[in-house]
Amino acid sequence: MLYKLLFFLFISISIFADGYQSKNERISAIDKEIEILMEKKYALENLKEKISKINSEEITTGKSNTRPKIALVLSGGGAKGAAHIGVLKVLEEYKIPIDFIVGTSAGSIIAAMYSIGYSPEEIEKTILDMNFFSLMNNNKDRNLRNIEDKFINEKYPFKVSIDKDMNLSLPMGFLNGEYIYLQLKSIFSRAEKIKNFDEFPIPYRAITTNLNSGEEVVVGSGDLALATFKSMAIPSFLEPVQDGENYYVDGGVTSNLPVDVALDIGADIVIAVDIGADSSKIGSNSSVIAVLDKISTYNGTKNTEFQKKIADILIVPNVKEHNTIDFSNLSSLVDEGIIATHQFDYLLKNLTFDKEFENQKERALKEKKFKISEVTLSGNSILTERKVKNLSPNVSNKTYTKEDLELWTKKIYSIPYVEKVYYEVDGENILFTIKEKDSINIGTSLNYISEYGASVKIATTIPNFGVWTQNYTLTAELSKYPKVFLNNVYFYEIGDFKILGSFDIGYKNFPLFIFKDGDKVSTYKSEIFTTEFALGSTFSNSTAMGLKLGYENYSTRYYEGDQSYSDFKGNNQFAYLKPFIYFDTLDNKAFPSSGSTFLIQAFTSEELKKESNYNGFSGVFSFNFPITNKLSLSLGGSLGKISSDSLENTKLFRIGGSKNSEISYSFTGLPIMGRYSDEFYIGSIGMKYNLTNTLYLLATYNVLTYSNVDLSFQRKTELWKDKEYGYGGGIGWDTFLGPMSFMVSNNIDTSSPLFELYLGYLF
């Protein structure tokens, strides 16, 4: 009985407590609602008071059409800046005329576009269509780079420079921002000749930070693209923007929500939009991006709390779950801006001024073309005005579109010693501001090839620019098969035509793998001392041809393995003559989607000890066709023939592996050097599908026919009669270490699949 009584008492107390708690919660919720309503009442009264004050001034002064001056302030926040577009859409629904607009970082871009007449829909389309990945790199447009630069420099993804005083010169940011700047120039081309931002349909101010003084700088004149570029130059990520003697970085460092700037230039009512840095604390799971974001915006974020208090309407879109560098959800960010702005409908409806709004829209700037008859340069010491003029696109009547100016600038930027290019159009004059590098360059490349192993390649280049341009390069490869080369390249330019010469001397060695029935049974090593002279010419950025004269001293010996063969032993000396032609228009060397390439060379050689003559030719080619914006096909192959009255096996062509390299012609279905031949022909068809901007699905099908001399480990084949077929697929990835690919193919000699891994550029 006592137990039942206690149980009843417990239940009664629980019900009473729940009822009490629910009552308190309801009271608390009502209090919160009352507080929100009071805040709204205060905000509405404050806004009406300001409008009433302006109306009173109208009666006192006798001015007509007097209304409050409305300013819009947009904060920085990286990709989260897309929320600003949603805010603009709602403001236009209410036909609210904006008299001043101020922006920081991402906000400065949106603000600048709106100030010169872009509609919110046009801004949204521009931002959503933008390929942000293409902007986030320092690589020069491959189709515009000269042929020798394509052949040499792109193999080294890691580069540092040493200046004339022998000081190590490291970049001031991960990106130099050239492509971001050019994108801004294209967007703002309609305002190219307007240098006073008060002359825009909506007067505009950009906020940046002087890196030397650490002070906030309000930019209201000059080049619009450069002003916004200064405002968004995130420290460490983007190089500081140089303008004269000063360097500028992201305005968010000092003032991420510059409401005070809007008030200073005459605003009566300020609408502020805060999508700024996340206020959360750094924890053990925070990324390096979060840390940099926190450091770079620390002072600016502290200032934001004050700026919020002096804004009349503060819109805070819910963007906490979004990353500042994630551009994949921009549409949802636009929606967040719309939702957040509609929370202030009760205020915004009081700021509708139909006539003024329509008048403002009619003043929107339009796209234009540019008449250019003069070219001037600034900051150059090597680059000549003549060369810049020669790079100009072919246009009629000296009239250029924004696309023409962008192409012209990219051509200048593609010159090896040019680091950065800015331009401004003033009347019929275009001024290019050039930043050059005239220093010792050190490039490094990491490399891994299945069977071959890992290697590190280092190249030191000493440029000497003048009438006769020269490059001295010392290259070393640290690996199981080391190499060292000294190279001198010199050329004389006549427009696009160059007289080209080079001298090489060095030591290299490479392996000779022996496979029997699909298994590698031994490895030989060839050591080569070589000297080579070359003379040729380049006719464009895609074509080079010439003649090579050289001497080679071969020494070949057994290196390792289970079984020794006598096929490759010996010492040989060769003198050779090689005419060649090289063509390259690929958009990407490792994973092309479009363009073509071929290297064809003939050779005549004499073995000096035996006085035996060698004659032949070889070639590789590839033609690439985009089918869709993600899918592309390639047709390619290779061929070679060598004949001699006494053929040395070390001179045989080596076939196998899924990538062409110095040591082997590619054939998917065979390991590197899976075949040796004195004559061969390979045809292939390939497919590439872009999973992302840097990740690809790859597939290849190829056919081989070849003949060979008698080798103890390889079966005899007859050219054209005997054919071998291979196929495979895999993954390709453009990494910061260079291109990487993992391929799986049928091993035509065994029933087991063949796995291959390549990392880095092949030499």
Image (cartoon, helix red, strand yellow):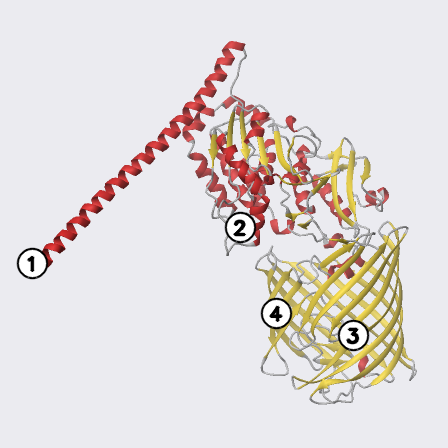
Q: In which quarter of the image is residue 523?
A: bottom right
Quadrant of image for the C terminus:
bottom right
**Residue 346 vertical placement versus 605 (above, below):** above
Which numbered mark, 2 or 3, is in the foreground of this view? 2
Q: Position of residue 215 (x, y in %)?
A: 64, 36
Which numbered mark, 1 or 2, is in the foreground of this view? 1
Mark 2 or mark 3, earlier in chain: 2
* Residues at marks 3 and 1, CA–CA distance in whole angstroms: 104 Å
* Residues at marks 4 and 3, CA–CA distance in whole angstroms: 27 Å
- Relative depth, front residue between 349 and 26: 26
- Circle number at residue 328: 2
Q: Where is residue 330 in the image (x, y as percent from the top left)?
A: 52, 46
Q: In this view, does 443 lie to the left or right of 692?
A: right
Mark 1 or mark 2, earlier in chain: 1
Residue displayed at 79% across by 76% down: 509
* Residues at marks 2 and 4, CA–CA distance in whole angstroms: 27 Å
Which numbered mark, 4 or 3, is in the foreground of this view? 4
- Relative depth, front residue between 211 and 266: 211
Residue for badge 4: 742
Q: Quadrant of residue 107?
A: top right
Q: Is residue 325 left or right of residue 674?
A: left
Q: Which amino acid does label 2 sit on?
A: Ser
* Residues at marks 4 and 1, CA–CA distance in whole angstroms: 78 Å
Mark 4 or mark 3, earlier in chain: 3
Q: Is residue 396 something that shows in the picture?
A: no
Residue for badge 3: 640
* Residues at marks 1 and 2, CA–CA distance in whole angstroms: 67 Å
Q: Is mark 3 on a helix, strand or loop?
A: strand
Mark 4 or mark 1, earlier in chain: 1
- Circle number at residue 1: 1
